[in-house]
Image: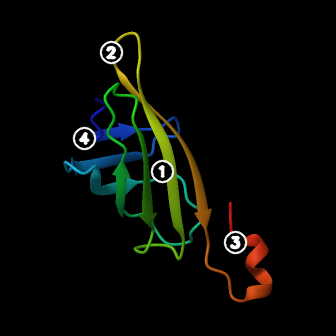
Amino acid sequence: ACNLTGWWENDLGSKMEVFKVDNDGTFSGEYHTRVSSAKKPIQPSPLIGSQHLDEDGQCTFGFTVNWKKFSDSTAVFVGQCFSGDDGKEVLHTSWLLREKVGSETDDWKAIR
């Protein structure tokens, strides 16, 4: 089975560390983004998630990142872990970011 525990890095140089995946698939960690539109300095941000543990090892997962230390945004990621021909595990993810807006009329521009 794919083991999410440890450090992962994406194509843009952002990194995440998953501390430990519990027997029920829940996990926590920290996300270290390299890209941000926030005006404050980037800081590591807490993440919490869940991994679907299945027998063939090509597991799906999701996690939420709270950018509370430097931004009013929250992001969610969903993905799947693949084991390549070389045995190296690779994560493929999609994400959605929600920014805080000042009013309900601005809701349309809050999601990227």
Amino acid on which disc 2 is placed: Gly
Mark 1 / mark 2, whichever is N-terminal: 1
Residue 34 image label? 1
Q: Relative to 19, say whether 10 is above or below.
A: above
Left or right of residue 105: residue 50:
left
Q: Amino acid at mark 1?
A: Arg
The quarter of the picture where residue 111 lies is bottom right
Which mark is drawn over residue 110?
A: 3
Give the distance between the C-alpha atoms of the residues marked 4 and 1, in whole angstroms: 18 Å
Left or right, 51 with reference to 102: left
Q: What color scheme is it? A: rainbow
Distance from disc 2 to disc 4, alpha carbons, whole Å, reads 16 Å
The residue that disc 2 covers is: 87
**Residue in front for this viewpoint, 9 or 110:** 110
What percent of the width, then of the height, locates residue 29? 29, 56
**Which one is earlier in the sequence, the residue at label 1 or at label 3?**
1
N-terminal of the two: label 4 or label 1? 4
- The residue beneath circle 4 is 6
Cβ–Cβ under 8 Å for marks 4 and 1: no
* Residue farthest toward the front in the current orientation of the protein: 55
Marks 4 and 1: which is nearer the front? Answer: 4
- Vertical placement of residue 61 versus 74, above or below: above
The three-letter code of the residue at mark 4 reads Gly
Q: Earlier in the sequence, mark 3 or mark 4?
A: 4
